[in-house]
Amino acid sequence: MQAHYIDDWHTHPWHQVIFPVSGLLQSTIEQNTVIVPHNAMLYIPANTRHKSVAVTQTQFLTLYLNPNHTVSFSSTLKSCFITPFLKSLILLLIDHAHCNNTEQMLSNLLIVLQDQITIANPYEIPLLIPSDRRLMSIFIQLQKQPDSALTLTQWAEKVGASGRTLSRLCSKEFGQSFSSWRQHIKLVLSLQLLESPLSIQSIAIELGYHSDSAFIHAFKSIFTQTPSQYRKSHLSHSGTNLNY
């Protein structure tokens, strides 16, 4: 999906596992909306109405699970961390479609997948993409220039609204202030930058932080670990070659 592409409301008769290889998705599943980065996965139960928006250019794999199979999966939505083992398991199941494995082997793998999704740690990231056109204009510009130093008043003038209106819209859509929403955009975008060889200090500068320590503190407030810890724990096994 190209950035901002919308895969509009639809359903699937089978359960669905969405696993971004790169980029970020924001998915709305009935009344729930979640951000799914490349170190997470989203499980959507069969016949559940949902839509997805690509926050950035995104490549992802999808696994469909027959609800009538002997292995019974949950009827509850789940967004969770994807461990190296869970990632390898999903890739193995996708590859199964091209192999002559036995039905018993497939069932065994699905049982393990069911268990892994059940015990996986939930992963919730603050929402980013607004529905209001003025906030969307700001969102698109911040994606291109996350280090922008424009104030709330300056952004308001730029999109033809008052500062009070933008504050009210952020509170309504995200339950947070404009400055918090803007910082969350920077921090979620940093997940992709952490895949690159850039130093933490360079990433902090690119995002508009005055120091790497300010970036580290803000990052830890959402992801509960430092950027370096995140890079080591979630991206150190991301080198799997994906030819799909």
Image (tube, rainbow, N blue to C red):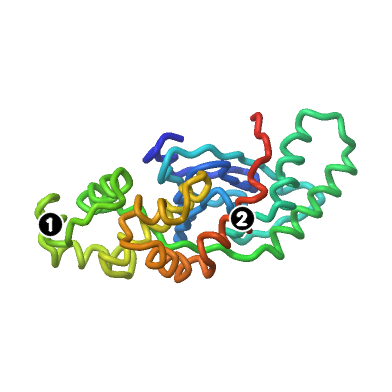
Q: Residue at x 47, y 62 (%)?
A: 125
Quarter of the figure with the C terminus:
top right
Q: What element does badge 2 sit on? A: helix
Q: On the rendered structure, is 154 left or right of 60?
A: left
Q: Mark 2 or mark 1, which is nearer the start of the sequence?
A: 1
Q: Judge whether residue 148 can be spotted in this image.
A: yes
Badge number at residue 50: none
Residue placed most toward the observer, 205 or 121:
205
Q: Position of residue 182 (x, y in %)?
A: 30, 60
The reply to whether the C-beta atoms of the residues labelled 1 and 2 are less than 8 Å apart is no
Please give the residue where the numbered disc 1 appears in the rendered image. Answer: 154
Task: Give the image location of residue 122, x and y in percent.
Answer: 59, 65
Give the mark count: 2
Give the class, few, some or many, for how many residues have Cα within 10 Å of label 2's Cα (few <14, many ≥20). some
Give the residue drawn at x 44%, y 38%: 57
Identify the amino acid type marked 2.
His
Is residue 44 among the parts visible in the rendering? no
Give how far across and how far down residue 237 sits, in percent.
67, 48
Q: Along the line of sight, which residue is nearer the eye, 48 or 186? A: 186
Q: Amino acid at mark 1?
A: Gln
Query: Residue 163: x percent and y percent?
Result: 13, 64
Q: Is residue 153 above or below residue 57?
A: below
Q: Secondary structure at mark 1?
A: helix
Residue in view at x 48 percent, y 52 percent:
191
Residue on which disc 2 sits: 234
Left/right placement of residue 202 relative to residue 47 reads: left
Gap between marks 1 and 2, in whole Å?
A: 37 Å
Residue 66's place in the image compared with 167, above or below, is above
Residue at left offset 41%, top offset 67%: 213
